Amino acid sequence: MKKSVLAKIIGAMLFLLIPAFGFSQEEDTSKKFSGVTFVSFKSHLSYNIGQDTASYPAARTLKPFAINKYETCYNLWYQTRIKAEKIGYYFENPGQGGTNGKRGAAPTAQNKYQPVTNISWYEAIVWCNALSELKGKTPCYTYNGIVLKDSSDTASCDLCTCNWDADGYRLPSESEWEYAARRTKNGFQKGNLVSGQISATNDEEAFLYAWTCENSGATHNVGTAGVPFDPDTITEPATGNANGAGLYDMSGNILEYCWDWFGDYTADGIYGPSVGYERVSRGGSISDYNLFYYAGDRYSYDPNACYNYLGFRLAYTVQ
């Protein structure tokens, strides 16, 4: 790697140690890695979604929001699911740890910090409601005023509404997701680069920020992109390279569900179309079915879809 590019990368990483212009990071004070540390965006919330991509860009002005630095890891998913089932929640798909985990099994040292996979969009929103309730927050997803607690009730889930003013946990909107993927200290990176990538002329630099089918055959612990992989050693989470806003794995590792129905960008559609057939997913993954992993790339999947390279990350509205 050229020294000039390395110097830029080091500088970008040093920037994460000081308060960021336009966004702030909550500190994870737990002794063990919890998998939950949010980055908040409260100002400079206007940008063009889809810029530098094949999609026609559209102006966006977002409400203040926060998004998790990490993809939802299996340990957090499992512990929350077990507690939620005791208070009336039901998950048709119990999830697994990463590419090779066992469905529904207790987390192990090898997979507890892997991203949860093999869940549908329905599981993701019901789990967000469960975590909100367990944390004493207002669940975001309801149908006819009733909080969604059953992922097998797909009709209610498809017709549900999201309360964007609630303080509970939820999926990011597609607009929020791309904003977070492209936000930097001084503005926005291009949409046709890996999230965090600095140089448009150095293709190898992309692999400092993303696990893809080109540098990995399986998922890895969250936040480890850019760390040399040793199959005999468990790489600690959050030891890799974050993007310009301090977020990990916004490109690669797993594909991440967003709230939106898939559709063309419109000037007034910051939460996507009101109806549709498939839900948006973002970020690409380690699967060779997801070859597009730039910050502005988008996919769509049936909300019933469950794959070992598909998961999500948490967001919430900043009050």
Image (tube, rainbow, N blue to C red):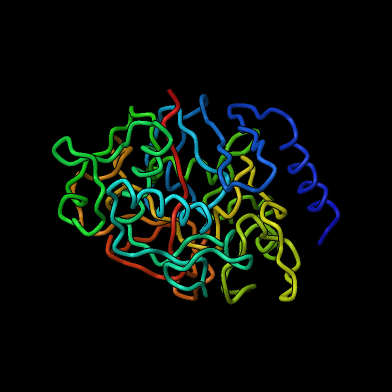
Q: Nearer the viewer, residue 98 or 299?
A: 98
Measured as percent of width and height from the top left, residue 77 is found at 46, 54
Q: Residue at x 65, y 34 (%)?
A: 27
Position of 131 relative to 318 (above/below):
below
Measured as percent of width and height from the top left, residue 241 is found at 70, 52
Is any atom of residue 54 visible in this view?
no
Instruction: Please state, as top left, top right, bottom left or bottom right, where the C terminus lies in the image.
Output: top left
Q: Nearer the viewer, residue 68 or 135?
A: 135
Measured as percent of width and height from the top left, residue 275 is found at 18, 49
Position of 41 relative to 278 (above/below):
above
Q: Residue at x 59, y 44 (%)?
A: 189
Which residue of the protein is positioned furthest toward the right in this rendering? 3
Measured as percent of width and height from the top left, residue 248 is found at 61, 50
Q: Residue at x 75, y 35 (%)?
A: 17
Which residue of the protein is positioned furthest toward the front in this rendering? 86
Q: Nearer the viewer, residue 194 or 84?
A: 84
Is any atom of residue 123 visible in this view?
yes
Q: Nearer the viewer, residue 142 or 190?
A: 142
Question: From the viewer's perspective, is 149 left or right of 232?
Answer: left
Which quarter of the figure has residue 148?
top left
Instruction: Please state, as top left, top right, bottom left or bottom right, where the N terminus lies in the image.
Output: bottom right
Circle count: 0
Question: From the viewer's perspective, is 273 left or right of 107?
Answer: left
Q: Residue at x 52, y 30 (%)?
A: 41
